[in-house]
Every structure is written in C-alpha cells, then in structure tokens.
Amino acid sequence: MAAKSPQQLGRPFPWPCADCGTLTVSPAVIDYTIKVKQDGVLHELHLPALEVPQCANCGETVITTAIDDKINDVLRAKLRLLSPDQIREGIDNLGLKQQEFAERLGVAPETISRWVNGALIQSRAMDNLLRIYFAIPAVRAALRGAEQDPNLGAAVVGV
C-alpha cells in the first residue's frame, strides 16, 4: 500500500524528493507500466497518461494511495473481477450486513470490509463465489453460515 504523500497531508507542490533530496517533485503525466501479481500470476498493466508526482531532477515517481487505487481498478477491469461498488451493491440488495455476509461465505468480516473498501482484491475463486451467491437464490438458500446443513455436498458412503 502506498504511503501518504505530502499532497494527501495537505502540503502543496513542490515536494522534496525522497531519492535525491531536491525540492523538485511536481505533478507530471506519464505512461506507466507495472507488473502486479494476482492469484499467483504476474500481470502487466499499462496506464497511459497517468498523473503522478515525479521528481524533475532524478525522475523518481511517488505512488500515492490514489494512484494505488487506480492500479487496482485497472487490474480488476483486466481480470473482470467485481468492483468494490458492485460487491457493496450486491450485499445491500440482499439486505445483509457485512458480518452476516461474511458468515455465509465463510470468510472473516474484515475480508468483506477490505473488498468493499477496495483495500483487497478478491481472488478469481472468491469472485466466482460472490457472483453465484448474488445471482442464484438456491445458492443463497444452501449457504446459510452456522445454520448450513453439515452434510451439504458430502459424499454418501455406501451402506
């Protein structure tokens, strides 16, 4: 996760460069390419015309929280994963609280909170589970958290 930048702390440009120490960090528009690992696979993302704080002296760029969020949005779009807003909307449409939803999926409530707040990107497997849970009433009826049938999906051992 990106550190808080001087701009996020309310300081105007120029900023001091953490790399070369000069007071020459200002907004710049660059083509930015980054490799991000998700689900054990390395993905190359290209963000054209990205506005970033950059040192005019040494070229060092500052990745702020806002830029980190843009990178995550591009990754979600590339992998066709549900966005935080879509997850929040799905939970709200079912009339569930995040705690209840977490129990039904079998994940920690903090995980749901991180998905909804955009701090964590769900795996493809969890994205698939979210999609079928939101879309199929029979799945919601079967996955009931603590009230779930303990034999659901268990193989029947011969008599």
Image (cartoon, rainbow, N blue to C red):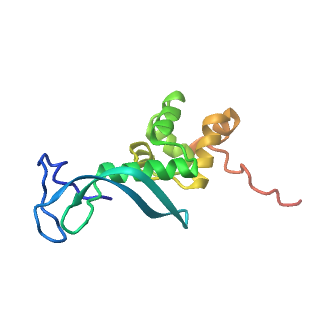
120 and 34: which is toward the camera: 34
| x and y percentages locating residue 11 in the rendered image | 11, 49
Total residue callouts: 0
Q: In this picture, is 29 found above or below 36?
A: above
On the image, which quarter does residue 34 sit in?
A: bottom left
Most extreme residue toward the right, as rendered? Answer: 159
Q: Residue at x 15, y 53 (%)?
A: 6
99 and 128: which is toward the camera: 128
| x and y percentages locating residue 32 in the rendered image | 39, 58
| x and y percentages locating residue 125 in the rendered image | 61, 54
On the image, which quarter does residue 149 sit in?
A: top right
Q: Judge left or right: residue 76 versus residue 13.
A: right
Observer able to see residue 148? yes
Q: Residue at x 51, y 49 (%)?
A: 76
Q: In this picture, is 24 found above or below 151?
A: below
Quadrant of the snapshot with the C terminus: bottom right
Q: In this picture, is 21 found above or below 81?
A: below
| x and y percentages locating residue 10 in the rendered image | 13, 45
Q: Judge left or right: residue 75 versus residue 25.
A: right
Most extreme residue toward the bottom, as rendered? Answer: 20
Quadrant of the snapshot with the N terminus: bottom left
Q: Residue at x 38, y 49 (%)?
A: 49
Q: In this picture, is 15 found above or below 112?
A: below
Q: Residue at x 50, y 62 (%)?
A: 44
53 and 139: which is toward the camera: 53
Observer able to see residue 119? no
